Image (tube, rainbow, N blue to C red):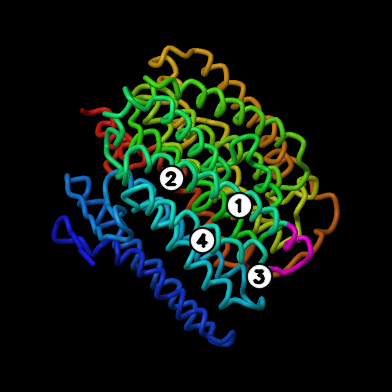
């Protein structure tokens, strides 16, 4: 086996993966009674991973990169690389996974099969980190499929008939999408060989002789990735999967699966084709139309959902497509808006799902019409939910406003003013399905006893559940108010944008 390393820290990407893989194997072997050991392993692994990613992010910002490469098949390398784009997704995943781990520990306290859950939970984060750090298409595909396999047991964790049915739907969509993605990767490999990611695209020199096949390969890749990214009409698995426990819903929407699809689209446009090549091939405008359709359609469907998690699910269908829309706007401003929203949406959506889980676990609330007066019973959770909702609407100075502002600038820069109409309409629809929830929380009196109230003494809910929701709400405020600080999501998106558009 030939191994090539770039830089003295070539082992760091491997260590990031190992910080999840090793705990996953150990946790699966633990008995259910070893709760303290399992908790210590989960938290230690999350903190180690965050420390490694933080160091790598600091180093990459100074122009360094780390790569591990070895031959996997004849003519095909396995590549892990830490570059600016990789750290964008790895940083989001590392931060939010720490909070999701804390939340899951509190949420699953006393429930059965915790070792199995947290074992696959750790495998899921390893797969997500592999997707972030993949340096070529084949490595990306390997971890993308591992993510499908590691998340299925989490979706069906409760083992109820409804959960098992949701799991089958999830597999049908994601395995089907994986097959389409594999076809696209194979076609592209036939044209260009082993395709490694490059800042300004790996296929720049092939446009003249293979433009038709390149277009076919592009749409195969987008279709395969669009399943996890929940692009219409490939989104059907996402609302169904809301039968999963709240920590799983949070990671599906904010950290892992949906974001993996969106990040894959980012990689294909910028690092495989190159944004200028994609524009010359006429690929960006249809992608913008597809993303805009998904944004409006998801928001309209969210209006008619009566379950909290279902409404949040259709909101995700809409909000994640802001990322694809920004990518499809040819120019730096759209890129900044789309990439910033990849991070901002994660912060806002995980806050909302944490809060939805808190209402369910503390008061037995699952439907929106049961939320009347919950703001007075659970004020900290409800403040966090309100911040997340206002951020999704785009209220300044929260994180969502920053994303939409740059997307608007990108629309004008790209000569596509109709996109401004999409953004305005979407924001109005966001307000239409979030503000009634906020109104119920704060301005309606409690209608009767809560469906299934649990007492946590002087606290409104378990501190394990409350702390992550409040923390991510604070991050949502900080990402907007402090958007111009170094290492903020906006500044990192600007860094990536410079590298994408610099020849």
Q: Write down the quadrant of residue 414 in the picture.
A: top left
Choose top left, top right, bottom left or bottom right for residue 448.
Answer: bottom right
* Residue identifier under label 1: 353
**Distance between mark 1 and mark 2 Cα atoms:** 37 Å
Mark 4 vs 3, N-terminal side: 4
Residue 100: mark in rendering:
4
Which element carries disc 2, helix, strand or loop? helix
The residue to which callout 3 is attached is: 456
Label 2, label 4: how far apart the Cα atoms are: 35 Å
| Residue that label 2 marks | 186
Element assignment for label 4: helix
Q: CA distance from mark 1 to mark 3?
A: 20 Å
Q: How many marks?
A: 4
State the separation of the CA atoms marked 4 and 1: 10 Å
| Magenta segment | 158-165
Q: How far across and down, in percent of the image, does residue 308 sit?
A: 71, 47
């Amino acid at each position: 086996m030939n191994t090539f390393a770039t830089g003295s820290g070539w082992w760091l990407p491997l260590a990031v993966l190992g910080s999840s893989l090793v705990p996953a194997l150990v946790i699966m072997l633990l008995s259910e009674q070893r709760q303290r050991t399992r908790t210590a392993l989960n938290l230690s692994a999350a903190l180690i991973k965050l420390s490694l990613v933080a160091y790598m992010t600091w180093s990459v910002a100074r122009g360094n990169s780390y790569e591990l490469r070895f031959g996997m098949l004849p003519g095909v390398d396995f590549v892990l690389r830490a570059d600016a784009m990789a750290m964008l997704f790895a940083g989001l995943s590392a931060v939010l996974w720490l909070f999701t781990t804390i939340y899951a520990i509190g949420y699953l306290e006393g429930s059965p099969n915790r070792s199995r859950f947290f074992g696959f939970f750790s495998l899921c984060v390893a797969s997500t980190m592999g997707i972030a750090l993949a340096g070529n298409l084949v490595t990306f595909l390997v971890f993308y499929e591992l993510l499908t396999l590691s998340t299925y047991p989490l979706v069906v964790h409760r083992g109820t008939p409804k959960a098992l049915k949701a799991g089958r739907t999830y597999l049908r969509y994601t395995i089907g999408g994986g097959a389409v993605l594999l076809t696209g990767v194979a076609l592209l490999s036939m044209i260009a060989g082993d395709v490694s990611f490059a800042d300004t695209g790996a296929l720049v020199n092939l446009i003249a002789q293979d433009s038709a096949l390149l277009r076919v390969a592009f749409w195969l890749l987008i279709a395969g990735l669009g399943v996890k990214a929940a692009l219409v009409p490939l989104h059907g698995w996402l609302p169904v999967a809301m039968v999963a426990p709240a920590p799983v819903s949070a990671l599906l929407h904010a950290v892992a699966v949906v974001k993996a699809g969106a990040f894959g689209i980012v990689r294909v446009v910028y690092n495989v084709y190159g944004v200028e090549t994609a524009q010359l091939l006429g690929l960006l405008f249809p992608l913008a139309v597809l993303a805009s359709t998904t944004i409006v359609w998801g928001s309209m469907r969210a209006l008619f959902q009566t379950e909290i998690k279902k409404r949040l699910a259709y909101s995700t269908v809409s909000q994640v497509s802001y990322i694809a829309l920004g990518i499809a706007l040819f120019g730096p401003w759209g890129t900044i808006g789309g990439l910033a929203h990849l991070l901002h949406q994660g912060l806002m959506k995980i806050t909302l799902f944490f809060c939805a889980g808190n209402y369910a676990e503390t008061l037995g609330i699952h439907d929106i019409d049961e939320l009347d007066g919950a703001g007075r019973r659970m004020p900290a959770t409800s403040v966090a939910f309100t911040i997340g909702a206002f951020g999704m609407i785009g209220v300044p100075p929260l994180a969502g406003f920053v994303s939409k502002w740059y997307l608007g600038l990108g629309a004008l820069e790209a000569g596509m003013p109709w996109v401004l109409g999409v953004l305005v309409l979407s924001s109005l629809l966001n307000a239409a399905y979030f503000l009634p929830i906020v109104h119920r929380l704060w301005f309606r009196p409690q209608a009767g006893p809560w469906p299934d109230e649990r007492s946590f003494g002087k606290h409104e809910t378990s501190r394990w559940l409350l702390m992550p929701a409040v923390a991510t709400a604070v991050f949502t405020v900080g990402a907007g108010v402090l958007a111009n600080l170094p290492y903020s999501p906006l500044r990192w998106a600007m860094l990536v944008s410079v590298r994408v558009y610099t020849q």
